[in-house]
Amino acid sequence: MPRTVALRCDGGPDVGVGHVVRCLAIAEELVGRGAHAVLLGSLDGVDWVRRAFDELGVPVRPAAPDPHGLLRQVREAGATGVVLDGYGLSPQIGSTLMGAGLGVLAIVDGPWGADQVADVYVDQNLGAAPLPEHPGARQLLGLEHALLRNAVLHHRRNPQTVADTGDADGRARPVRVLTVFGGTDAMGASPLLTPLVLATGRPVQVVAIAARADVRQVLEGLRPAPGQQMEVRTPDANLPALAATCDLAVTAAGTSVWEFLCQGLPCAVVQVVDNQAVGYERVIGEGLAVGLGRLADIADDEEARTRALGRLDGILGDAARRESLTRRGMRLVDGLGRARVVDALMQHMQ
């Protein structure tokens, strides 16, 4: 009889889509193995994510607000394993589920979410450290456990192929730049960073993702210089296909970075919120991306803004460095992380 896993996570304009996209990757791995999944949570305001679960055949149901109510939902779904992904989820959820004999896997980001109770912990971040508060639990740490959805894996570049930065006649072409800051851009990063790409004066083709109507309004008001082009799009599940057509991503230091590294798309990253600080510093420290700084500093400090502008100008003008970032990222993120994670969870399922 096929196994069933319940996924407890939420996505929306306030919390973003990083948690649900990670759970989508797990759901795809389960379905690919002939297993079943059910999502317990809210996807209000992120219709493209809901469509992805619908197309996969994974039902989405509101989650009970208390641990025992959630346990009843899990049992009604026939699930023997549960994935918990959310910083605000009570540790009592994990302890209640484990006490009922269910296998529990918690996805964390360093200390964020680490107070959860589980059999298995996953911290997919670069340089992730063991959780000292859970010495007896199995801990899956680092980029080899990055949770990547089908759309990313299907658009992974051939690591043996050298990036082409010229037209058919050999002339250099404009650098195609994707600016995207999560599925909701809750902090309004795109209206700050996208103009900086244009301000370099470099010949660029900018594809800017507008996650909200107010963001779209600002982006559509930008005026590219001669030799520059700009297109504004809404978020959808086909972002990896779009990313595969680009030469550089300007993005937040969140889960999208692991997707782009796997695909082979070099990144210039900004720390948008506090829980991205450790990941940002590690990515920059390991030379995996160009660091633009903290969003709050870029917004409020002219010196920080000038520094970010200079770094953008540098990477736009250096095709060899972009290619080096592509190769290094693809070596570290092999796309097999979700299979390793599901293997570990299933070892704790009855």
Image (cartoon, grey):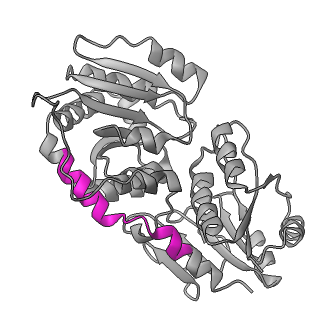
Number of callouts = 0
66 on left or right of 155: right
**Residue 73 to residue 245: above or below:** below
Residue at 64% from the left image edge and 74% from the top image edge: 105
* Residue 106 on image: x %, y %: 62, 70
> Residue 137: where, in percent of width, then height?
58, 85
Name the side, left or right, on which 226 lies relative to 65: left
Per the image, is 338 magenta?
A: yes
Which residue is farthest front?
Answer: 168
151 or 97: nearer the eye? 151
Eyeballing the image, is 30 above or below 184? below
Q: Is residue 96 above or below residue 147?
A: below
Q: Which residues are magenta?
A: 322-341
Quarter of the image with the N terminus in it: bottom right
In depth, the one of 141 and 297 nearer the eye is 141
Q: Quadrant of residue 204?
A: top left
Residue 132, given in percent of the width and then of the height, sits at 51, 80
Picture layout, residue 101 above or below residue 291? below
Residue 159 picture quarter: bottom left
The extreme bottom residue here reads 136
Is residue 286 something that shows in the picture? no
Q: Is residue 111 visible?
A: yes
Side of 117 where 139 appears, left or right: left
The location of residue 242, given as percent across then percent down, is: 42, 38
Depth check: 139 or 273 in front?
A: 139
- Our reading of the magenta stretch's main secondary structure is helix
Residue at position x 55%, y 84% from top? 138
Queried whether the magenta region covers residue 156, the answer comes back as no
Q: Residue at x 72, y 65 (%)?
A: 37
